[in-house]
Image (tube, rainbow, N blue to C red):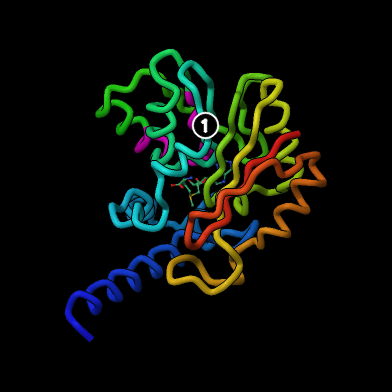
Amino acid sequence: MNLRRAGALAFAGLLAAALSAQEPRPRAGPGGRFGNPPDLETYIARLEEQGRAQWQRPDEVVAALGLKPGQTACDVGAGPGYFSLRLARAVGKTGRVFAVDVESVILDALRDRVGQTGLTNITPVLALPHDPLIPPGSCDLILIVNTYHHFPDGPTYLQRLIAALKPGGRIANVDFQKRRTAIGPPLEQRLAREDFLKEAGAAGLRLVSEKRFLPYQYFLLLAP
Ligand SMILES: C[S@@+](CC[C@H](N)C(=O)[O-])C[C@H]1O[C@@H](n2cnc3c(N)ncnc32)[C@H](O)[C@@H]1O
């Protein structure tokens, strides 16, 4: 094995370990609050890790959402803002992003990043576990990344998100496939694409489009 490949494998192993630590069991936490690990500082650093872009492909994900300047997007389970900041650039100065999270320490990290970038179109929202607290009929698009399994009751939560959509609005869900992948949490902590779609159907959502360029995650676009 050459040095480069050995280095790449070591990096993949570290990232897998980090994700195992950061990704809780569906609807159950690994010791911290809201399904997060107790060491939030490490968790935040891992969510923002540079190497994540190799498999998360965040700019392609945001491009695939087809947002237009002036639109309103919501990032539910925003974390420290990995996607929120990119969404904010996509909707531009005349648009708005609600960055929703239940963990105040994580939301503080997001606020710090917003301050550093000078973006003026992000509204951080400290939500309740069962309610994103975003205004009804306000969003063109709601993005959920690696977060659905944190919700205490998925279908009920999705119904609240539907109420927050504008007419014609969509919900995008990105989450790990329930199969062995080089990166990602243990299989028992993942929710299969088909199981998510069943819950989404129960909430009144239908699949309108699916993007297949992510190596480890499904990427589904849904509408009421
Ligand atoms: C695995 S992280 C994903 C963060 C971000 N979406 C990303 O991809 O970098 C899950 C996030 O969801 C948040 N969260 C957990 N339960 C939540 C809930 N009921 N409502 C909103 N956010 C929640 C956590 O605090 C955490 O920041």
Residue at horizontal 43 percent and vertical 71 percent from the top:
182
Q: Which residues are magenta?
A: 97-110
Count numbered badges in the picture.
1
Q: Percent position (x, y) of residue 121?
A: 41, 19
**Magenta stretch holds residue 68:** no
Residue at horizontal 76 percent and vertical 40 percent from the top:
205
Residue at horizontal 59 percent and vertical 33 percent from the top:
142
Give the residue furthest to the left. Answer: 3
**Magenta stretch holds residue 108:** yes
| Mark 1 CB lies closer than 8 A to ligand 1 | no
Q: Which quadrant holds the C terminus?
A: top right
Q: Residue beneath label 1, please?
A: 66
Give the residue furthest to the bottom. Answer: 1
Where 195 falls versus 6 (above or below)? above
Q: Residues within 10 Å of mark 1 (few under 14, many from 20)?
A: few
Residue 106 or 90: which is nearer the viewer?
90
Residue 73 or 81: which is nearer the viewer?
73
Q: Percent position (x, y) of residue 196?
A: 70, 54
Where 158 falls versus 31 (above or below)? above
Q: Secondary structure at mark 1?
A: loop
Quadrant for residue 136, please give it: top right
Residue 46 or 60: which is nearer the viewer?
60
Q: Percent position (x, y) of residue 107?
A: 42, 36
Residue at horizontal 48 percent and vertical 25 percent from the top:
97
Q: Which quadrant holds the N terminus?
A: bottom left
- In the image, taking residue 221 as reference, residue 18 lies left or right, namely left
Quadrant for residue 171, please give it: top right
Q: Percent position (x, y) of residue 155?
A: 75, 45
Give the residue furthest to the top. Answer: 94
**Which amino acid type is shown beneath numbered disc 1?**
Gly
Quadrant for residue 144, please give it: top right
